[in-house]
Image: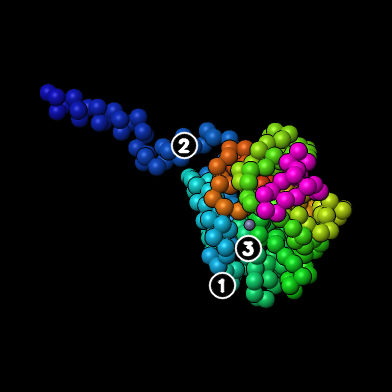
Amino acid sequence: MIRHILSLLSLLALLSCGGRSQKTAFTSARDVRPASYAGDTPRFRALLYYSDHVEEAHRQFTHQSIAFFDKLTVGDGWKLEADTTLLGKGDLSQYDVIIMPDVHPGTEQERTLFESYMENGGGWLGFHAAAYNDQSLTWPWFRTFLGGVRFLCNTWPPQPALLEVETRDHPVTRNLPEEFVCPSSEYYQWQPDPRQNPDIRILVSLSQKNFPMGLKDVVFGGDFPVVWTNTRYRMLYLNMGHGDECFSDATQNLLFVNALRWVVSESPSGKKSYL
Ligand code: ZN
């Protein structure tokens, strides 16, 4: 008798599915999601370009950034590829953004590829030493791309700092507080000040309340832009990125997610829906 009841229940279950497979039923359920939901197709692709031949504090940040961004790919919403070279990848325009934690392209071939990628609508998210350059850099395009600036000095030792959000009229900063204390990092000052470049829009800077700052390299004041974009490109630079504490603060992590989201949302391949 029990066996007959189980058979009847199985038949009713089959009829209720209309003979469709479970996969079809799942697809049907998914259809109730908003039209903007992109389904099974990865919505964008990112390349994280890195090097292990950097100082230890930069290597720590680099590997934590790989883990941080990789965690954000959960559910296969987007694809992240991490590699130590830009070569052999075909057309870089397949990537909506190239993330560079603490390094920029070092060989002529890579520099040419990256320059072409950015000049043709590529996206860039650079951290800390990715923008480091001094008089020894023989890549004028890259310095112009950053805002025409080169490294002047740094705060030392790495320490937490009060950051000032200069504008919240931007997708990267609109949900951030006016000020927040960021985890320990090393901050660079630049010459000339990127603020003097009309193409540069500064979003976050070191608060003047920090000064004097440092114990070895003491800074008594001055302008320390921390997050900026060159409005001629789809790019964002963030000066944090030294040591193993940069991903320990929710507000700063939110800034990082906002940064990735904004650069991708500006992609010419039509990702405006991410704003
Ligand atoms: Zn550093």
Asked if residue 200 shows in the view, the reply is yes
Disc 3: which residue: 103
* Earlier-in-chain disc, 1 versus 3: 1
Q: Earlier in the sequence, mark 2 or mark 3?
A: 2
How far apart are the two marked residues, 1 and 3, measured between alpha carbons?
19 Å
> Where residue 178 appears, x then y in whole percent?
73, 34
Residue 209 falls within the magenta-colored stretch: yes
Mark 1 or 3: in front is 3
- Please give the label number shown on residue 40: none
Instruction: Determine the residue positioned at 75% across, 43% down.
Output: 211
Q: Which residue is mark 2?
A: 28
* Image quadrant in which the N terminus is located: top left
Give the residues drawn in magenta, as a range.
201-223
Figure quadrant of the C terminus: top right
Q: Which mark is residue 88?
A: 1
| Residue kind at label 1, given as amino acid type | Gly
Secondary structure type for disc 1: loop
Question: Mark 3: which secondary structure?
Answer: loop
Q: Nearer the viewer, residue 121 or 213?
A: 213
Label 2: few (<14), some (14–19) or many (≥20) C-alpha neighbours in 10 Å: few
Q: Is residue 247 left or right of residue 263?
A: left
In the rendered image, residue 7, in percent from the top left (x then y), is placed at 20, 30
- Residue at point 53%, 46% (across, down): 72
Q: Earlier in the sequence, mark 1 or mark 2?
A: 2
Tally the marks: 3
Q: Say what amino acid the circle numbered 2 marks.
A: Ser
